[in-house]
Image (spheres, coloured by chain):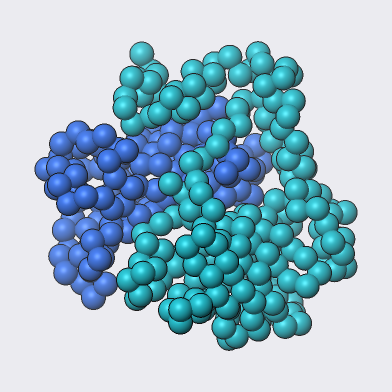
Chain colours: A cyan, B blue
């Protein structure tokens, strides 16, 4: 028996996961059928991922907050050894979620790198201040890519449906305030949207 | 959050190197000597030479910082990094430390995973964000890695 199949009987993998694993063998056959007909991620089409071998599932998560970032005009550093560097100073913004809300302090930034394969890497550092005056240091690393016409529209500052490109981040947090110490202990994922007036990130806690 | 299974990864970890108290916490380095991975789009083995640089923080949270090289069954090399957090009730963590088998739903063990490869057939890995759910076994951890869609 293959060790993956052995995992089937383990309590570590929930019913949802077991179903996925059991479905893998059948997924090639099912590739052109309804199992994937609802799969409409544009970035995926752009990347030509072999979707016949993967069934869409859902990582257990819950909303943490939405972060809206206001930025100054970017500093275009240009061609550097790893790609094209752009530094975007963060001037402010706000965030709100079920367990925290407040303002983004000025002084942070996003150190963007456009890689040679066309993928934009994001590397953000900002300070959040909650409405009850706690300071939270937030960082993320992320990736943004999509079809050339969509990326071109974004660079022209146009409003673009965020479902038409891939913009995902891995935020991390540090705080000394006990009320928000749960942020020190969670893995989170952000779904980003580039808007004409700044970036918006919907961040989920991975449960 | 929408996702799909990328792979399940099992790494082989010999006895770790216990460095003890360092400025950021308690450092343990776990060399990785091998392992296997299997998913709908890739499968293969873990090459020896990587490791997991573990730090137990003063707040009791274990930070995991893993670097390994994967070799697919068609000969491609993939550099994988993972940063994660593990924490849970003291009695559960004590059982893990004793090498006992523990239901992974009893503790939090999640990581964020990144990949680098030059192989065209696996270049999609360069462009995705992935999260892993870990299960710490006595023989080494098992990670179920999902691509975030």
- Residue A115 x %, y %: 68, 62
Along the viewing direction, whichever of A107 and B10 lies nearer the viewer: A107
Q: Is residue A98 left or right of residue B123?
A: left
Foreground residue among A143 and A96: A96
Question: Which residue sits furthest bottom?
Answer: A107
Tell me which residue sits at (84%, 61%) in the image.
Answer: A159
Q: Residue at x 60, y 40 (%)?
A: B2
Q: Quadrant of the C terminus of chain B?
A: top right
Residue A76 against residue A17 in the figure, above or below: below
- Residue in the image at 70% along x and 51% along y: A166
Image coordinates for residue A62, horizontal then vertical, percent: 51, 49
Where's residue A92, x and y in %? 64, 81
Relative depth, front residue between A128 and B136? A128
The image shows residue A129, relative to residue B106, as above or below, that is: below
Write the residue at 87% across / 68% down: A156
Question: Residue A26 appears in which quarter of the rendering?
Answer: top right
Is residue A95 visible in the rendered image? The answer is yes
Quadrant the N terminus of chain B occupies: top right
Q: How many marks?
A: 0
In the shown orientation, is residue A48 left or right of residue A126?
right
Is B100 placed above or below B66 here? above
Q: Is residue B17 above or below residue A33?
A: below
Q: Is residue A135 visible?
A: no
Residue B68 is situated, as x and y percent measured from the top left of the image, at 40, 48
């Amino acid at each position: 028996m293959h060790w993956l199949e052995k995992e089937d009987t383990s309590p570590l993998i929930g019913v949802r996961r077991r179903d996925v694993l059991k479905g893998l063998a059948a997924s090639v056959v099912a590739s052109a059928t309804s199992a994937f007909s609802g799969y409409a991620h544009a970035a995926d089409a752009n990347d030509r991922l072999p979707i016949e071998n993967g069934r869409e599932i859902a990582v257990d998560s819950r909303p943490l907050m939405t972060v809206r970032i206001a930025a100054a005009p970017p500093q275009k550093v240009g061609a550097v050894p790893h790609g094209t560097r752009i530094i975007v100073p963060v001037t402010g913004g706000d965030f709100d979620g079920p367990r925290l809300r407040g303002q983004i302090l000025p002084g942070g930034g996003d150190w963007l790198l456009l890689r040679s394969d066309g993928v934009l890497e994001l590397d953000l550092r900002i300070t959040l201040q909650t409405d009850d005056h706690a300071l939270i240091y937030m960082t993320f690393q992320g990736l943004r890519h999509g079809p050339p016409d969509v990326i071109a529209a974004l660079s022209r500052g146009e409003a673009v449906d965020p479902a038409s490109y891939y913009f995902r981040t891995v935020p991390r947090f540090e705080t000394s305030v006990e009320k928000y110490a749960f942020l020190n202990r969670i893995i989170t994922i952000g779904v980003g949207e580039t808007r004409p007036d700044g970036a918006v990130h919907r961040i989920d806690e991975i449960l | 959050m929408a996702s799909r299974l990328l792979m399940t990864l099992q790494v082989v970890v010999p006895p770790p190197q216990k460095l003890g108290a360092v400025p950021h916490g308690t450092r343990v380095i776990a060399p990785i000597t091998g392992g296997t991975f299997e998913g709908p789009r890739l499968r293969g083995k873990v090459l020896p030479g990587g490791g997991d640089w573990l730090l137990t923080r003063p707040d009791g949270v274990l930070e995991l910082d893993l670097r390994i090289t994967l070799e697919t069954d068609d000969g491609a090399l993939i550099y994988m990094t993972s940063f994660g957090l593990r924490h849970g009730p003291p009695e559960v963590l004590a059982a893990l430390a004793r090498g006992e088998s523990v239901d992974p739903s009893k503790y939090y063990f999640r990581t964020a995973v990144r990949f680098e490869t030059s192989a065209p057939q696996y270049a999609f890995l360069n462009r995705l964000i992935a999260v892993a759910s870990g299960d710490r076994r006595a023989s080494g951890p098992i990670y179920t890695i999902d691509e975030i869609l």
